[in-house]
Image: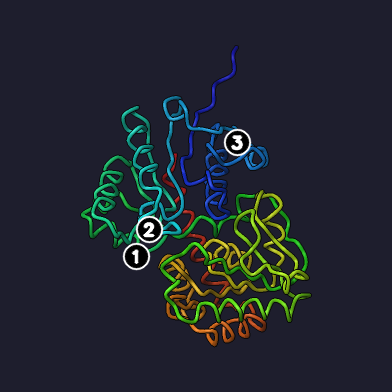
Amino acid sequence: MSPVSKKKAVIIGPYRRHNFGDDLVGGVIAKDLQNKGYDVSVPLLGKSNADWLGTRYADRVGKLIENADTVVVGGGGILSDTSGPKPGMSYLEVVARSALNGKLAGKKTFLTSVGAGPWILDSSKMTTLIVTLMADKIGVRDEESRRHLASLGVNSSKVVEGADLALLSSDYLDFEKGSGGKTGLQFDTWSFRDVLGNPELSEIIGAVRSYAARHSPEVALVSNGARNSQIHQAETAECETLNYSELKDFLPRLAGLRSMFTSHLHLAIVAYSQRIPTFSLYVREKTKRFYDQIGHPERAIDLSTATAKDFERLIEEASSAVWTDADEETLLGLQKKSRSLLDFVD
């Protein structure tokens, strides 16, 4: 008697650049689908990540959509045109093509753990609306994303509001918390043109670098990609470096920090999920949304108008911040909302 073939699922997302947050969310979705009995492919997630997750390695989409039973698109700010380093850059075209191909092939097609809006271009609004028409169900990671979709006239019955799947990293991914207890510093703004108009930007960069140099035994310079942090210079060479290349190596070390200061959304989310106090000078609205969700809007300041004194205040608070009962209650509530973005994907 021949064995019963497993159902196949393909996860399409912004994985080709190996950004930590995108790869992580893809991994959580993959593990959930494996638990539901699927043979999973995540094209472009990388061979080392695929091997660690137990997914089928693929360096291109090819015929994976055609051969799949279920197509999942997610996560990240992929229903927006402001999510890339430059306004107007996004993964909307990739999303639209994948959703269309899935629908034309008669596959169940889902979007989940996505951020939606804001949009700069009218063409982006139209593309987003077309994508929502193709999807059987859409899971957004915050209330603002739901509102942005509603403003386009998207059918509300299709939309599930939850919270970012990165909050579930420990629930789905097998890693042990590392040791170290340092403050993580990540401040990479060189490709975000819309913050370069801040007249104090150079002073802020200098303040971050100076803090790292003075406290090098207690600081880890974090990058959500393979290259070194912008703060990594001769004066900060004594600091530990924590760069992302593989989930299995990066996650335990990130979870071992005692506090996190970052301009990157998913570094903040994973730190928070590990009960690590987190603070941000942010460059995107999606990061502000997260700090509103966790009840700490005072820990996130818009970098386009921030000052060096803002950094000094935040890093001082980070050095003494502790996890509270209120933080724990909020985290558990958000994790429950996160699971709602996986429940419908099958």
Residue designated by label 3: 55
Residue 315 lies, in percent from the top left, at 61, 81
Q: What element carries label 3?
A: loop
Q: Earlier in the sequence, mark 2 or mark 1?
A: 1
Amino acid under disc 2: Glu
The span from disc 2 to disc 1 (Cα, nearest Å) is 9 Å
Residue bearing the label numbered 2:
161
Q: Position of residue 80 (x, y in %)?
A: 35, 55
Could you tell me which secondary element the residue under label 2 belongs to?
A: strand
Q: In which quarter of the image is residue 146?
A: bottom left
Amino acid type assigned to the residue bearing label 3 in the image: Thr
Where is residue 313? Give x, y as percent: 57, 86
| Horizontal side of residue 260 vs 151, given as left or right | right
Give the Cα separation between the discs numbered 3 and 2. 27 Å
- Characterize the local packing of mark 3: few (<14), some (14-19) or many (20 or more) Cα atoms within 10 angstroms: many
Where residue 338 appears, x then y in whole percent? 48, 57
Residue at position x 54%, y 84% in the image: 308
- Circle 2 crowding by C-alpha within 10 Å: few under 14, some 14–19, many from 20: many
The N terminus: image quadrant? top right
Q: Residue at x 62, y 71 (%)?
A: 260
Which sits in the foreground, 111 or 244? 244
Q: Residue 144 carries which label?
A: 1
- Determine which of the numbered discs, if any, sits on residue 110 in the image: none
Placement of the C terminus among the 4 image quadrants: top left
